[in-house]
Amino acid sequence: MNDELIYQISLPLVPNIGDVHTRLLIQHFGDAASVFKAKHSTLEKIEGIGTVRAASIKSFNDFSIAEKELVFLDKFGIKKLFITDPGYPRRLLHCYDAPVLLFLKGDTELNSARIVGIVGTRSASEYGKNITDQMVEALASHDVMIISGLALGIDATAHKAALKHNLTTVGVVAHGLHTIYPNSNTHLAKEMVKNKGCLVTEFVSGTKPEKHNFPLRNRIVAGLCDAILVIETHYKGGSMITAKLADSYNRDVFAVPGRITDYKSSGCNYLVKNNKAQLITEAEDLLTAMGWKEKNKKIKKQKELFVELSSEETSIFQLLEEKGPLSIDEINLTSGMSSSQTAAAILNLELHAMIECLPGKVYRLV
């Protein structure tokens, strides 16, 4: 077996080494194998690691879990995405506590141009379900990917609505991919994968859906999206955690209000009342706020032909042509140019109608 793959799966399993420190180690050493092969004296000198964490790494020897996991992944066609892999979700890269390792069942590309997470109560009312379906239907003509947590209630309704209206939908789960929780959503999960969607988790096979895993699941839902839409939730509901995390990641948060006497909408009303979410009564509100609404009456500036580009502009154009949409930070990092050079080149490319800016300072070719 490939040693690096073994080390990549094993690194998140080391005691006392969470996502933040694991990412710090990868940034320092470049790969997982080098982390395990480093000397104790080298590890403990890294800022944030210290003696205890260094000892945890050097004493870790249970690589059998990773070996079994590789067999499991191969047997069931499950993909692995490490944080240094090209296909790792770009939006998650900007979250300080993003998981360094993801497992995917399905062929979905998690770097779609437009992604909305829809979350809410497990005990959804008919009103909440209807609103969810209406919202997803309205988003269907704008090629929006729908992400949720594959839970009962609003989550499942969002996934079903996405399938109904031919949108790609992704379910983030709080357990290993050896099972589906709740079991009643097993068929739904299969349909999602069958229809070019996928299931995502950071947990190895055999991990049960224990209570403390769900907030970890919620941060992935929040981090994968451009925006989170909360539909029906109590003010102590799990969806409130997702909304809070989304806000901390600088994602747009929207909430559908409810009657002030409605227990299931108390969380949504709280978010709106305390300026933690934008009030939304129809999908048009979200599309307008995100800058996704089609402006059919506006004539798009024609791309200029035979434009003479500077070396910096050519470099960025070729970069976007090769890799697809990239954030300003990714362009800076990959191009090797200074921030001022990048900004000037991007501005000129925009003026020539060769690239356009998406929400979150993400740029793509026109």
Image: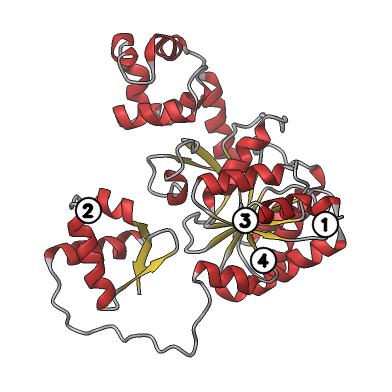
Q: Looking at the picture, which amino acid does disc 3 mark?
A: Ala
Question: Disc 2 versus disc 3: distance between alpha carbons?
Answer: 32 Å
Mark 3: secondary structure: loop
Q: Counting residues from the N terminus, which is met first, the one under dot 1 or under dot 4?
A: 1
Question: Disc 3 versus disc 1: distance between alpha carbons?
Answer: 16 Å
Q: Quadrant of the C terminus?
A: bottom left
Q: Counting residues from the N terminus, which is met first, the one under dot 4 or under dot 2?
A: 4
Q: Nearer the viewer, mark 4 or mark 2?
A: 4
Q: Residue at x 36, y 58 (%)?
A: 326
Mark 1 in CB contact with mark 2 (< 8 angstroms): no
Question: Disc 1 versus disc 4: distance between alpha carbons?
Answer: 16 Å
Question: Disc 4 versus disc 3: distance between alpha carbons?
Answer: 9 Å
- Vertical relation: 360 (above or below) 104: below
Which residue is tagged 1?
260
Q: Is residue 219 left or right of 18 when viewed as pictured?
A: right
Q: Residue at x 35, y 22 (%)?
A: 35
Which residue is tagged 4?
280
Q: Counting residues from the N terminus, which is met first, the one under dot 2 or under dot 3?
A: 3
Q: Residues within 10 Å of mark 1 (few under 14, many from 20)?
A: few
Q: Position of residue 357 (x, y in %)?
A: 37, 67
Q: Is residue 113 left or right of 132 when viewed as pictured?
A: left
Q: Is residue 200 visible?
A: no
Q: Nearer the viewer, residue 350 or 203?
A: 350
Q: Is residue 190 visible?
A: yes
Question: Disc 4 versus disc 2: distance between alpha carbons?
Answer: 36 Å
Q: Position of residue 323 (x, y in %)?
A: 33, 59
Q: Residue at x 34, y 30 (%)?
A: 31
Q: Looking at the picture, which amino acid does disc 4 mark?
A: Ile
Residue 277: which disc?
Answer: 3
Mark 4: secondary structure: loop
